[in-house]
Image (cartoon, grey):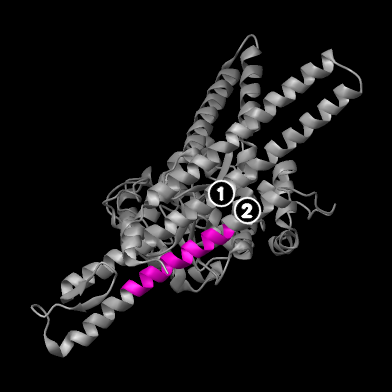
Amino acid sequence: MVGYAQLSMADPAAWRATGSAWASLAGVAERRSSELTDDAADLRAAWSGSAAESADSRLARLRGELVALVPAAIETDQVLAEFAARLVAARAQLAAAVALAAATGVLIDRRGGVRADPVRMQTDRTGTAVAQVATALREALVLAATADGEATARLARLAEDAGTGWTAQPPSYRPPAPGEPALVRRWWAGLTPAERRWLVVHEPELTGRLDGIPADARDQANRLLLVARRAALVERWEQLLARVPRGPLELAGLRGVEAAMSGLDALVARLESSQQPRAYLLGLDVAEEGRAVVALGNPDRATDVLTYVPGMTAGLDDATGELGRAHRVLTRCAELAPDAQTSAVLWLDYDAPDFLHEAAWDGQARAAGESLHRFQEGLRATHEGPPARQTVLGHSYGSLVVGTTARDHGLAADALVFVGSPGVGVAHAADLGLPPGQVWASSAPDDVIRLTRPPDELALRAALGASPVGAIAGWLAGPSDELWFGRDPAGPGFGGRTFPSGRYGHTGYWHPDNPALDGMARVVLGR
């Protein structure tokens, strides 16, 4: 068991920093491997014969060993980051137990023993108060001990693998991409750890994008692709720069690529930081505006998981900004339930509209449906232990993506949340495949999205506006729950549930003082 004094003095930030130091070894190994590749090429150009072939073979094995070290270094970071996160939760439980003791007149000694304070406590409630504090302390210590035991076992397995070989080539079968997540999960579970690392190293494109492969392996694979992804952006930028003459399209393309590179650099900085919760890179595409799927905390080991789908203009250029919104929900969850294990995923794996004329149609939302459906099924398939509570949140056009996916494909979710919605593609909460009591929405009083009336209503108002009786007719018509893409999910006729929002406009639902942030966090926690 972890002792009371041990837990009270534990420093989760130090464990997190240690994990980051291990992750930094991945970059060192990749650079040394690249240097060996260059050195071997120079050697072959100047040396031939059996000795040269032997040296070249030895250099190739060294490169292989260095590359195989990369996923192991990242995995060590993952283990220590998760251990640090659970220490944070255990220490929060410990602090709550200490606060309970202070409030009820119970004394805690240095070894965690509890007894009543004879000065403060009445005899008739001594036993109950002491038992409550003792139970709270025990729960905190059990959580810390469990986390310590699991982290120790995972690191021990890594050490054992180092002695037997980091990687081993798996059988030739690969599931089709995109595949059924449950089938992918069964295939992955049938591989040895060494075979899985081989796939991470040698087939990161496949490993990083398949729903049904656990988050830790996808994160390792996608991090290996970061250098290549940035190189692709640089190449595209150079191609545009070389075009002469450069017209408006080329200039716009240059600005777009530069914004994507800046966004990717910011995302890499977040991935490499020791900030909690640790970020897991579950998907990355630099084509066009770019796409990214990033989890804060490991969703496979969390009890509550939020998937956030952003709306119009979302792209790689501001992925960290959108990730910040997900982080603010997690922060509020931690304030409401310090001992909860939560994870939030930014799901930006669709072509979000860039202009109003694109956002006026549901084509891009419908095109995203199969991918979002498959991602949520993957979260269910890879989760460890009892099923997590899964919440899917859509903002603005993202709420239409969530709604049409639930309508057309179904969503593996326990709750849906819509904020700042122009309509979600259905007329009633019951049409989304979830109990109406688990469909939530909020719309700020000053959100301009409220003006997105259906096309036929806008045409009628335009016609009435041209006549003297237009104002009177509009007044008689009264307020309407109909928006551009259907009935307002925050309206009384939709049949779902609502939570309030302050006057923070269309993008202010995540403002720290907005009650909507509290509402989103409570839905995620099932409260």
Badge 1 crowding class, 10 Å Cα cut-off, few under 14, some 14 to 19, many 20 or more, is many
**Nearest the eye: 161 or 495:** 161
Q: Which quadrant is the C terminus positioned in?
A: bottom left
Q: Which amino acid does label 2 sit on?
A: Leu
Residue beneath disc 1: 76
Residue carrying label 2: 158
Residue 322 visible somewhere in the drawing: yes
Q: Of 10 and 317, which appears nearest the observer?
A: 10
Q: Is residue 453 toward the left or the right of residue 98 in the image?
A: right
Residue drawn at x 36%, y 52% is 11
Q: How far apart are marks 1 and 2 (CA)?
A: 8 Å
Front tag of 1 and 2? 2
Residue 175: where, in percent of width, then height? Answer: 78, 55
Marks 1,2: beta carbons within 8 A: yes
Whether the magenta-drawn stretch holds residue 506 is answered as: no
Q: Give how far across and how far down residue 243 sits, in percent.
A: 65, 13
Question: Which residue is most to the left?
Answer: 119
Farthest residue to the top: give it: 245
Frontmost residue, 73 versus 402: 73
Q: Residue 273 carries which label?
A: none
Secondary structure at badge 1 equals: helix
Instruction: Report if residue 141 lies within the magenta region.
Output: yes
Q: Residue placed farthest to the bottom in the image?
A: 124
Q: Identify whether 285 is placed above or below 232.
A: below
Look at the picture and state if 459 lies above or below 242: below
Q: Which residue is drawn at 47% across and 48% down?
A: 278
Residue range in magenta is 137-154
Kind of residue sitting beneath label 1: Thr
